[in-house]
Image (cartoon, helix red, strand yellow):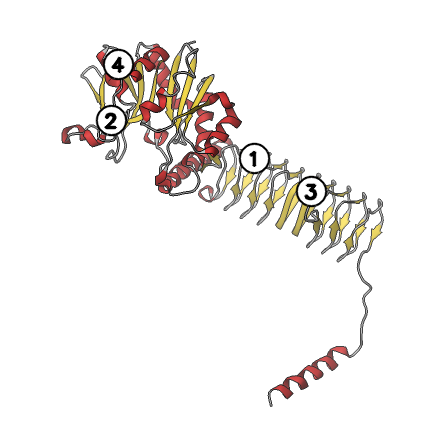
Amino acid sequence: MTARAAVIMAAGHGTRMKSRTPKVLHKVGGRTLLDRIIDTVQAAGCDRIHVVVGLIPEVRALVEKRLGPQAVVVQDPPMGTGHAVLCAKDALADFDGDVLIVNADPPLLTAQDLEPLFTLRRGGAALALLGFEPVDPLLYGRVLRGADGHVMRIVEPSEASEQVRQVKLCNAGMYLAGREDLFRWLSRLTNDNPKNEYFLTGIVAEAVKEEKLVRAHIAPETAVMGADTPMQLSQAEAEFQKRRRAHFLAEGVAMTAPETVFFAWDTEIAAGATVEPYVVFAPGVKVETAAVIRAFSHLEGCVVREGALIGPYARLRPGADIGEEAHIGNFVEVKKVTVGKGAKANHLAYLGDGTVGAGANIGAGTIFCNYDGFFKYDTHVGDGAFIGSNSSLVAPVRIGAGAYTGSGSVITEDVSDDALALGRGRQAEKEGWAAKFRKKMAARKAGKSK
C-alpha cells in the first residue's frame, strides 16, 4: 500500500470564535478539535503527520505532546492556505507517498469519510478532493467539473459569477496527492488576488494545466462542517451527541430520554446498562453491564462496575472505581476512591482519596477529610465497616474491617477491626437554661425599644 502522510492546517487564529482559547483547542465531545483531527488521520493510516501552526504556544504544545516536536511546522508570517502547506515541504522531503491535506476544525470528520480520496488515487487521479453540497453555500468556493465529471477548477466565493454561484458542489478544503506533484504545484502558486495570499485551491488549476486527472468525492455536509464560531461549535456538538446516543441505543444501552444524556468522545457503556435522564459523561468513563446511572449524575474519569447503582444527583470524579453492586446515592461525591463490592454510600457524603471495603456502609454526612491545605492523604475503610452519620474521618486514617464509628464522631486515629470508635464531646444538659435565656433576651429587646 502507498505510504500515507498528513498535513493538518492549524495556523489560523480563529478570531470568529471570539474566545481567548484558540479555535482548534475548543472541544466537541470533551476532546479538542485538533486532537480529534489527529485521531482521524491516524485512523486513516497516516504514519507521518505534520501540523502547521502559527505562533500560539498552546497549539504547538498540544502537537508536541501528542506527536513530538518533529511534527510541528511553523507558518510565520501567515500568507494563505497554499503557503501553509508549502511550509511542510522540508519536513516531508524524505517522504515518498501520498499526502493528505486536512483542516484542523472539522470535528465530525472520520477515517471513513476520507477513504474515498485514497480510492480515487488508486483509480488514477493525480489529485483527489472532498466536496459537499451545503444547505447554504454562500461562503464556500465552488467546484467546477466537466461533462466527464473531472474537476476543472475551484472558484473562490469572492470571485464567483452569478452563474457559478448556482453550482451546488462546494470545496471542503481537503486534498490528496503524491508528495512530488503536490509541492511542484504549490511552488507555482501566486498571490495575485485582493488578499495577497497563496490559495491552496490553486493546485487544482496547476494539475489541470499538466493534464492530470482531478477527481472529487461528495461527502455529507456534517462530515466536513467546520467549527469557526460558537454557533457552529454548538451545532457540531449537537450532531456528535446525536450520533453517540444512536450508537449506545443500538448497542443495547437503555435510555428513557436519550436527548437529555451527554457523552464524551471516549465514553464506554456496556450493553444492559441503564442511563436515566439528564446524565453527563465527561471524558474517561467506563460503565459495565447491569449498572444503573440515575438521573442528574455527573461522571468523569471513573469506572462503574457491573450492577452498581449511581445517583440520582451523584458526582463521580477522576479515579473513582465503583465496585459490583455498590451504591453511590444522592449528593455523594467520590474522587480517587475504590469502592468495594456491595458497599453503600447512599446520602450526602464526600469520599476523597482512599478505599471503601466490600459491604461497608457510609452514613449520611460522612466526610473523608483528605486535604490539609498542602497535601492529600488516604482514608481506608475496611470490609463490612459501618461509618455512622456525620462522621469526619481525618486522613491519614484506617477504619478496620467490621468496625463502627459513632454518629457525629471526628476520627483522627486508626480503628481496630470490629471495634467501636467514638470521637465526640460528652453531652451535657443544663435544666431550665433555655427558658431563662429567652426571658433575659426578651427583656433586653424590650429595653432597647423604649
Distance in Å between CA atoms under marks 4 and 1: 45 Å
Distance in Å between CA atoms under marks 3 and 1: 18 Å
Q: Amino acid at mark 4?
A: Ala
Q: Nearer the viewer, residue 350 or 305?
A: 350
Frontmost of labels 3 and 4 is 4
Q: Amino acid at mark 1?
A: Gly
Q: Position of residue 46 (x, y in %)?
A: 45, 18
Which residue is found at the position 37% from the left and 24% from the top?
Answer: 102
Q: Which residue is mark 1?
A: 284
Distance in Å between CA atoms under marks 1 and 2: 39 Å
Q: Earlier in the sequence, mark 1 or mark 2?
A: 2
Q: Earlier in the sequence, mark 2 or mark 3?
A: 2
Q: Earlier in the sequence, mark 3 or mark 1?
A: 1
Distance in Å between CA atoms under marks 3 and 4: 61 Å
**Mark 2, secondary structure of its residue:** loop
Name above or below for residue 381 compared with residue 144. Answer: below
Frontmost of labels 4 and 1 is 4
Q: Which residue is mark 2?
A: 169
Q: Which residue is mark 3?
A: 353
Distance in Å between CA atoms under marks 2 and 3: 56 Å
Q: Amino acid at mark 2?
A: Leu
Name above or below for residue 75 compared with residue 327. Answer: above
What residue occupies the far front of the structure in this picture?
77
Q: Earlier in the sequence, mark 4 or mark 1?
A: 4
Mark 3 vs 4: CB contact within 8 A: no
Q: Position of residue 58 (x, y in %)?
A: 48, 34
Q: Which residue is mark 4?
A: 207
